[in-house]
């Protein structure tokens, strides 16, 4: 034994064992919470709540129907996180009421569940429900189409007669509920509808006489609806309206717009429209030739592709040129004396398109008289002739002059 204690290897082994023991002791004392945490994590529980879990009904559906069963129930699950997480994520469990062994009448039944592990606690709200079991009845009903938001159908569009496929459906419920059925409908919203509807699938809604929804089984639960959407049109004359007066120097040479306009609306409305007029054009605001856009005055229920129309207005302008000298033709060796007007000038009014008027020069206007056949030594009244550019008309004032021709 003494030799053993004196052995270097023995002493080394003993020292190593003591060192390890001391290390473990210090570690446990320094971090006591870590071990406790591991224990708590392994055994921790949590609760998950699922608000809307579908409630299944097990019943002899060939012979019975039931009322009073909610569509969903609330399920609370409590258990270890490792077990609970996949159950909640996959929702592989089912919740149901089993009515297969019950007869007609009122019953209070328990809501049951399946496929939930034993180590998970399940709490269902409500835990029990009151149900009414009745003999199964069935009846065929015609499906009506109800058009909604008809006032929001675009102006000018017209709806055809809707068709439903199938035209009838079978409703399954108790006879008491079937006797309450007043309407079996689908709804078509025509807000901003501009194209025909083709085979649109719509759910069926069943109402009692007070307009309350009835929770019944409908076979099939939806139908397809088709409906033509038309845009009837016709062409009518266009009447361009005006008001007021042009400035004094202008007159209208021509006012041009389309003779007819295409209008859209329901056929019964179109039949009442004989013409479409524009809003009144205020002539007092017209200062030159050109095209203007004028709003149309549309009757209620009538639409057009463009609510404004282009009107081309061409103006004639009158301009007075004063002191135009009168040229004398056929004078020869005779002397012509102007008696009236004494200065031998007149005023000439030129009338032409306003777009050309600013280019007309006074020098282009020639006033003249012909005294070839005028008696000598006496006063004579002679017509004045006016010549100028062909795009204008001219009016002299005065139209005649008084002259005296002397030998």
Image: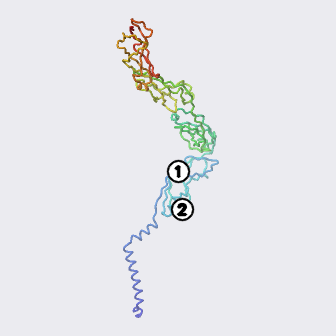
**Which one is nearer the viewer's eye here, 246 or 328?**
328
Could you say which quadrant of the image residue 146 lies in?
A: top right
Q: Is residue 244 above or below residue 78?
A: above
**Which one is nearer the viewer's eye here, 53 or 358?**
358
> Mark 2 packing: few (<14 Cα in 10 Å), some, or many (20+)?
few
Residue, disc 1: 72
Residue, disc 2: 117
Question: Residue placed farthest to the left in the image?
Answer: 343
Q: Position of residue 195 (x, y in %)?
A: 56, 38
Residue 373 in view: yes
Q: In the displayed structure, does residue 248 sit left or right of residue 264?
A: left
Residue 252 in view: no
Q: CA–CA distance between discs 1 and 2? A: 21 Å
Q: Position of residue 78 (x, y in %)?
A: 48, 60
Pick the quarter of the image with the N terminus.
bottom left
Q: Position of residue 81 (x, y in %)?
A: 48, 63
**Which one is nearer the viewer's eye here, 252 or 270?**
252
Circle 2 — which element? loop
Q: Is residue 170 above or below residue 319?
A: below
User: Total marks drawn?
Assistant: 2
Earlier in the chain: of badge 1 and badge 2, it is 1
Question: Which residue sits at x=53%, y=62%?
Answer: 118
Pick the quarter of the image with the C terminus.
top left
**Which one is nearer the viewer's eye here, 192 or 150?**
192
Circle 1 — which element? strand
Could you say which quadrant of the image residue 369 lies in?
A: top left
> Mark 1 packing: few (<14 Cα in 10 Å), some, or many (20+)?
some
Question: Which residue sits at x=38%, y=72%?
Answer: 31
Q: Position of residue 337 (x, y in %)?
A: 37, 10
Q: Is residue 349 above or below residue 142?
A: above
Q: Is residue 71 above or below residue 189?
A: below
Question: Residue placed farthest to the top in the image?
Answer: 378
């Amino acid at each position: 034994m003494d030799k053993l204690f004196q052995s270097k290897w023995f002493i080394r082994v003993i020292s190593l064992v003591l060192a390890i023991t001391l290390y473990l002791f210090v570690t446990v004392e320094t971090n006591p919470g870590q071990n406790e945490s591991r224990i708590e994590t392994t055994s921790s529980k949590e609760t998950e709540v699922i608000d809307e879990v579908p409630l299944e009904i097990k019943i002899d559906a060939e012979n019975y129907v039931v009322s009073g069963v909610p569509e969903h129930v609330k399920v609370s699950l409590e258990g270890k996180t490792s077990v609970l997480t996949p159950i909640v994520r996959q929702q592989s469990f089912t919740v149901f009421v089993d009515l297969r062994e019950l007869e007609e009448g009122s019953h209070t039944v328990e809501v049951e569940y399946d496929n939930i592990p034993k180590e998970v606690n399940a709490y269902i709200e409500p835990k029990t429900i009151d149900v009414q079991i009745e003999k199964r009845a069935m009846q065929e009903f015609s499906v009506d189409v109800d058009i909604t938001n008809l006032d929001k159908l675009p102006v000018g569009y017209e709806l055809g007669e809707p068709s439903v496929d199938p035209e009838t459906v079978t409703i399954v419920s108790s006879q008491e509920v079937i006797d309450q059925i007043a309407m079996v409908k689908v709804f078509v919203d025509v807000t901003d509808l501009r194209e025909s509807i083709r085979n649109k699938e719509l759910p069926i809604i069943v109402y009692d006489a007070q307009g309350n929804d009835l929770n019944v089984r409908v076979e099939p639960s939806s139908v397809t609806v088709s409906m033509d959407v038309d845009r009837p049109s016709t062409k009518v004359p266009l009447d361009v309206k005006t008001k007021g007066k042009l400035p004094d120097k202008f007159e209208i040479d021509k006012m041009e717009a389309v003779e007819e306009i295409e209008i859209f609306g329901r056929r019964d409305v179109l039949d009442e429209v004989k013409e479409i007029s524009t809003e009144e054009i205020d002539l007092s605001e017209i200062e030159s030739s050109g095209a203007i856009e004028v709003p149309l005055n549309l009757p209620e229920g009538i639409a057009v592709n463009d609510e404004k129309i282009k009107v081309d207005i061409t103006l004639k302008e009158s301009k007075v040129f004063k002191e135009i000298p009168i040229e004398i033709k056929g004078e020869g060796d005779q002397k012509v004396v102007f008696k009236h007007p004494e200065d031998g000038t007149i005023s000439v009014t030129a009338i032409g398109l306003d777009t050309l008027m600013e280019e007309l020069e006074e020098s282009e206007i020639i006033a003249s008289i012909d005294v070839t056949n005028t008696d000598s030594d006496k006063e004579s009244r002679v017509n004045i002739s006016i010549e100028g550019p062909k795009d204008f008309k001219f009016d002299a004032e005065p139209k005649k002059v008084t002259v005296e021709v002397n030998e």
